[in-house]
């Protein structure tokens, strides 16, 4: 189209030049005609009449010129109007090149975003399919074990399962102390005595005063549902799941006391008080379970909620790394690949810690060097407890947090009291990789203040108290320790 336009413009220029030449020739012919008329007039008339004839000729000359010029101008205007109409017709729907380049750039960016989102979707779908397969395998294994159990029950003489009493009486160790060496009759008497003394049919509400936790603010006689351990674990999992979803929607963390009350009221309505007191009693009885104990510590304020979220992120991140490494999606990894994945998921762990994790995983899976079915490491028992490998992961993480705080204590050099500036400098010395946002959050946990108050906070705090606050939160090392001279 540009070449055509250029050719048309060239033709227009040529036509304009030809028109100018023709116009010049016409002017010359016109002037020659006028000269000829003047000569004829001068020869026909006398000398006295000549000036008057010349004046008339001058007066006649101007309208002719104007008429010719007007005609030429009209022709030029008509040609220009025709050309302008043609250009409007041909180029009316043409997009400017600048706009086209902008749209093309935007289109390419959208294509890149679409490809990225498609890759993320494919990865999430692969993870979902893997988890679904694990669920099917676990379900099949559970059904098989259930069938074997039923067969054993039919073939054997029914005997009391005294081990179940441990869930009611505060753990297996206490039940072992009470029942060891006792006859069945004596065990029954002990069990009835314990139930009569501690697990009465009703609880007495603590009232609605401000000094009572909000989830226990009920009055009157409340029925004791005598929750078993698996029921307690199930309720706690539901509470955590809904709280994480609610916090994600609100983009801020809600208070666990208030959320627990809201959850119980939404689930049990008018019987929320009965379930609240029954749940607290169940938590008290099953402190041996790690998840129950952690929930109780968070509920009572001994530990910050970030510890639970840190553990959850730790385990889920490890599973993502293992699934991503499993390119064949077979659910199996070689020992070396499993070791490399552990090193990738936990880059700051020592070699002996990685070896301990590999050894524990092999022992749990009854593996002697072949491929590891890593998905089975994330299975839980009937009470919702993790097995040895995941317990070791959480134990090592806790040990590393305590070592991190011990390094901080050493860096502070025995100061009795510290300020925000002192603690900030100490963290930068022992952990240079710590980013500013995380460091500010750590300082708010240490001094129990809001982030907006950090810059104006100049009050000193007891060093041990600040370190205790840090131990109660999920404070972990962000990068390798600096090299010592």
Image (cartoon, rainbow, N blue to C red):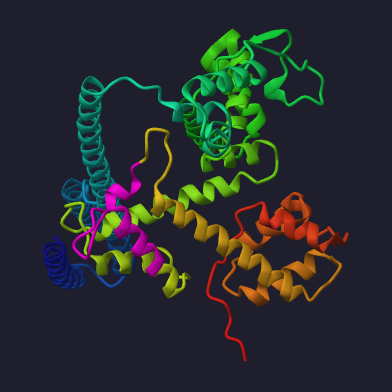
Compared to 461, does 146 lie above or below? above
Magenta stretch: residue 8 in it? no
Quadrant (top left/top right/bottom left/bottom right) for the C terminus: bottom right
Whether residue 96 appears in this view of the structure is no
Compared to 298, does 13 lie above or below? below
Residue 234 percent location from the top left of the image: 46, 28
Residue 310 percent location from the top left of the image: 53, 51
Residue 182 percent location from the top left of the image: 52, 29
Residue 296, quarter of the rendered image: top right
Q: What span is in magenta?
A: 355-379
Residue at the (62%, 60%) spot, across then down: 437
Q: Is residue 202 left or right of residue 387?
A: right
Residue at the (40%, 22%) spot, across then down: 160
Q: Please tell me whether the stretch drawn in magenta is mainly helix, strand or loop.
A: helix
Residue farthest toward the bottom in the current orientation of the protein: 485
Residue at the (74%, 11%) spot, across then down: 219
Magenta stretch: residue 373 in it? yes
Q: Is residue 416 left or right of residue 257?
A: right
Residue at the (36%, 22%) spot, across then down: 159
Quadrant (top left/top right/bottom left/bottom right) for the N terminus: bottom left
């Amino acid at each position: 189209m540009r070449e055509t336009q250029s050719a048309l413009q060239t033709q227009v220029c040529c036509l304009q030049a030809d028109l100018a030449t023709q116009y010049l020739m016409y002017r010359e012919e016109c002037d020659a005609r006028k000269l000829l008329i003047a000569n004829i007039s001068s020869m026909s008339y006398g000398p006295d009449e000549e000036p008057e004839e010349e004046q008339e000729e001058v007066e006649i000359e101007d309208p002719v010129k104007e008429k010719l010029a007007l005609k030429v101008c009209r022709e030029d205007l008509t040609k220009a109007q025709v050309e302008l109409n043609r250009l409007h017709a041909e180029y009316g729907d043409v997009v400017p090149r600048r706009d086209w380049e902008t749209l093309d750039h935007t289109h390419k960016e959208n294509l890149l975003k679409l490809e990225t989102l498609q890759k993320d979707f494919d990865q999430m779908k692969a993870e979902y399919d893997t988890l679904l397969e694990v669920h099917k395998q676990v379900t099949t294994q559970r059904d098989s074990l259930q069938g074997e159990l039923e067969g054993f029950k039919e073939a054997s003489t029914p005997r009391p399962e005294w081990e179940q009493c441990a869930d009611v009486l505060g753990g297996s160790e206490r039940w072992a102390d009470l029942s060891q060496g006792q006859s069945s009759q004596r065990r029954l008497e002990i069990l009835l005595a314990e139930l009569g003394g501690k697990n009465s049919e009703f609880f007495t509400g603590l009232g609605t005063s401000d000094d009572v936790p909000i989830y226990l603010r009920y009055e009157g006689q409340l029925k004791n549902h005598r929750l078993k351990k698996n029921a307690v674990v199930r309720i706690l999992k539901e509470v955590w799941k809904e709280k994480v979803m609610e916090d994600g929607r609100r983009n801020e963390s809600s208070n666990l006391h208030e959320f627990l009350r809201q959850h119980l009221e939404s689930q049990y309505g008018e019987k929320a008080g009965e379930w609240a007191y029954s749940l607290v009693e169940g938590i008290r009885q099953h402190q041996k379970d790690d998840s129950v104990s952690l929930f109780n510590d968070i509920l009572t304020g001994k530990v910050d909620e970030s510890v639970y979220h840190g553990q959850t992120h730790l385990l889920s991140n490890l599973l993502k790394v293992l699934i991503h490494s499993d390119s064949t999606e077979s659910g199996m990894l070689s020992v070396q690949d499993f070791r490399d994945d552990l090193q990738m998921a936990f880059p700051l762990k020592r070699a002996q810690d990685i070896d301990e994790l590999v050894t524990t995983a092999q022992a749990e899976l009854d593996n002697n060097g072949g491929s590891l079915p890593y998905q089975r490491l994330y299975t839980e028992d009937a009470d919702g407890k993790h097995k040895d490998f995941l317990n070791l992961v959480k134990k090592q993480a806790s040990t590393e947090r305590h070592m991190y705080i011990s390094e901080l204590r050493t860096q502070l050099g025995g100061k009795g009291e510290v300020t925000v500036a002192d603690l900030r400098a100490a963290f930068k010395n022992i952990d240079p990789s710590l980013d500013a946002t995380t460091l500010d959050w750590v300082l708010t946990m240490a001094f129990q203040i809001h982030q907006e108050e950090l810059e104006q906070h100049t009050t000193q705090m007891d060093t041990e108290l600040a370190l205790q606050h840090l131990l109660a939160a999920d404070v972990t090392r962000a990068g390798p320790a600096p090299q010592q001279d």
